[in-house]
Image (cartoon, helix red, strand yellow):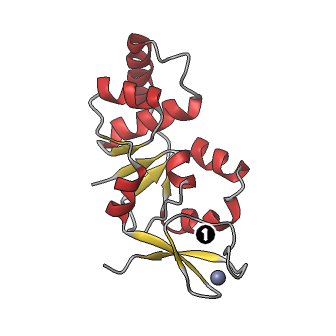
Amino acid sequence: MPYVLDATAIRAGMSIQEKGQFFTTPGVIGEIRKGPVARSLELAVEISLTVTEPGDAARKKVMEAARKTGDDGRLSETDMEILALAWEMKAVLVSDDYSVQNVAAVLKIPIQGNLDGIRKVINWTFRCRGCGKYYDEMQPDCPICGAEVRTVRRKD
Ligand SMILES: [Zn+2]
């Protein structure tokens, strides 16, 4: 099952373990690179998140749906892109944005808005390289020893 991830999903600490399953758009990557966790996510994103753009037909479809629900004014260009990509790929869209979810419902795009739920699907956790402590959420640095925290596959 392919997943399309928005910036919130990736920023929440999404690490992508299985190649070819996870997609996002250039706009989302642009937003993430502006954020504070850009450095730690850079590697994961470049290794296994496929960055691709939706076609014009899909964009048009999303635009029409957003106009119908009245969400067109609330959706950013990036929101439109991820919706179009998810629609085009018949993927599950991962976003907790209300307007995105609203339009996704109209287009019958399956949506995963619960980031804890997606964490279980992707099966990952975070571990300090220094002291080895595990964290449920991405930390810029380990709160205990200050070392780099990396994304690792959850062992269960
Ligand atoms: Zn540590």
Q: Residue furthest bottom?
A: 131
Q: Is residue 97 above or below residue 140?
A: above
In the image, residue 110 sits, relative to residue 121, either above or below, namely: above
The residue sitting at 67% across, 79% down in the picture is 144
For disc 1, the marked residue is: 43
At 41% from the left edge and 24% from the top edge, which residue is drawn? 62
Q: Amino acid at mark 1?
A: Leu
Q: 36 above or below 107?
A: below
- Residue 156 falls left or right of residue 63: left
Residue 19 image offset from top left, x and y in percent: 40, 67
**Mark 1, other Cα within 10 Å: few <14 / some 14–19 / many ≥20:** few
| Towards the viewer: 23 or 71 | 71
Image location of residue 146, percent across then percent down: 73, 78
Choose top left, top right, bottom left or bottom right for residue 117.
Answer: bottom left
Q: Quadrant of residue 110?
A: top left
Mark 1 falls on what kind of element?
helix
Q: Answer with the quarter of the image where residue 43 lies.
A: bottom right
Q: Nearer the viewer, residue 115 or 90?
A: 115
Of residue 124 and residue 93, the one placed in the foreground of this image is 124
- For the N terminus, which image quadrant? bottom left
Q: Residue at x 45, y 39 (%)?
A: 96
Identify the residue at image location x=30%, y=23%: 106
Quadrant in the picture for the C terminus: bottom left
Q: Observer-nearest residue: 36 or 66?
A: 36
Query: In x, y percent, where is residue 82?
Result: 47, 38
